[in-house]
Image (spheres, rainbow, N blue to C red):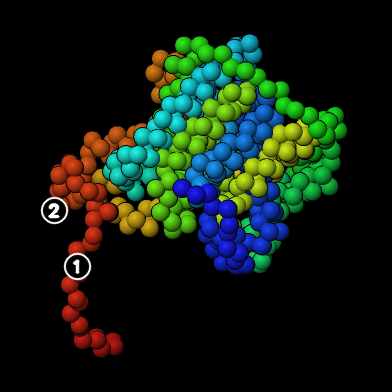
Amino acid sequence: MAIQLSWREKRGGIIAPDERLPWGPTIALGLQHVLAMFGATVVAPLVMGFDPNLAIFFSGVGTLLFFLIVGGRVPSYLGSSFSFIGPVAAVIGSKAAGTYNPADIPKALGGIIAAGIVYAILGVIVHFSGTDWIDRLMPPVVTGAVVMIIGLNLAPAAYGLVKQGPFLAIITMLAVLVIGLMTRGLVARLPVLLGTVFGYVVALVLGGTNPNGREIWFFRVQGVDLSQVKQAPWFGLPHFQSPTFDVRAITLIAPVAIILVAENFGHIKAIEAMTGRNLMPYLGRAFAGDGIATIVSGLGGGTGVTTYAENIGVMAMTRVYSTVIFPIAALVAILLGLSPKFGALIQSIPGGVLGGISTVLFGLIAVTGARIWVENGVDFTKGINLFIAAVALIMGAADYTLKLGQFQFAGIAVGTFGAIILYQLFKGAPQAFGEAEAVPADAEPAERRPAPPTQPRQSRQPRGRR
């Protein structure tokens, strides 16, 4: 498959994956995608005890690899995966629990590489075996629930940021809405970037450079801590680390690949719903690209990576799905990874500003799940759809956890696999498709079957007025 290296220029409306805006707006949108992924990509390595600059650097490298492997056909950005946090903590300990041992990071890197290998192999299998079996395993009711779970599961993280600075969160959120809904042209395409800049300026003006901020009327406005920005050098290589391979670490971390498969599948379905393009032929390549990016990241000391929900939220907001944006964003991320000062500047964005941005983005992800249901005609008068979606959403949104030995499945994984397993178990139940419509267990889901022809309505005489 040839790599797409040309994009038809289009100046307005929905921008498809094989189209682009003029180069100036396209580069600006690439910067916006970098900003959208930055918060979570920095938080994940900090929680695990990894170098955040390495994570940023390898998010860019991984995105470029993904772009090449899918031939430039799938618009996605790869960033640090939170699915690795639990298994990695089982290997190197937790900072919060006081058990963190940085000497074990090479072992964790070996486990991350093993997860990438498993993931890439699954991608090759899907590529050559086709995706029909995945469609049967995850019909629209399941994929819509998975996408919605991703957004709802992130809601507490958004609220945690909002609590750090409620005033800034509200101001930033309103700025995003005003820019996205009440402006035109390029400005309307950059609500996340411009909303963040607006919130940052408000924090500087009203909160000052004291991290504790200032009291303004009845509100405390967060300040901007510039101390790390001043100290950080402009240029510098990240601290690369080499992996070692430990059997225990591999058995703990490698199964994360299964979670990433389900997560990536949900992301691809969300992008399909937004773009109206059939991306299933590239699903195996997407899995393999994600797996290879994770291997490369682990070889250099970075975290495992995955397609990023935040960037899907940006696409839903801007309606720009051009794939050329992502290599631009990747190159910017690589440069940021090589510049500690720029990294420190992004990390200085107050939590309240990030909370306002996250509230919008995570909500858009959840709504995209509902969009999958609507566009595929999922009928919630049928018991199978109603019950599966209901149970899966609560498990995912409430962040149910399941421990199997030292391996822990978090809410997204529990909700995802819960939806898949429950659907397969109960799709042949007598009430699954309505009282009068029982179907065999191996039948195609109802929402994928063509609707029966409707009978023409008989005309009625209009009633007289009373």
Q: Secondary structure at mark 2?
A: loop
Q: Which mark is residue 436?
A: 2
* Vertical arrangement, residue 120 with respect to residue 26, above or below: above
Which residue is painted at 46% across and 26% down in the image?
A: 117
**Quadrant of the rendering where the C terminus is positioned:** bottom left
Tell me which label, 2 or 1, sits earlier in the chain: 2
Q: Position of residue 162 (x, y in %)?
A: 64, 40
168 sits to left or right of 391: right
Amino acid at the residue labelled 1: Pro
Which of discs 2 and 1 lies nearer the camera? The answer is 1
248 sits to left or right of 330: left
Q: Which residue is mark 1?
A: 453
Q: Quadrant of residue 262?
A: top left
Amino acid at the residue labelled 2: Ala
Q: Position of residue 442 (x, y in %)?
A: 18, 42
59 sits to left or right of 392: right
Q: Position of residue 312 (x, y in %)?
A: 54, 48
Q: Quadrant of residue 254?
A: top left
220 sits to left or right of 3: right
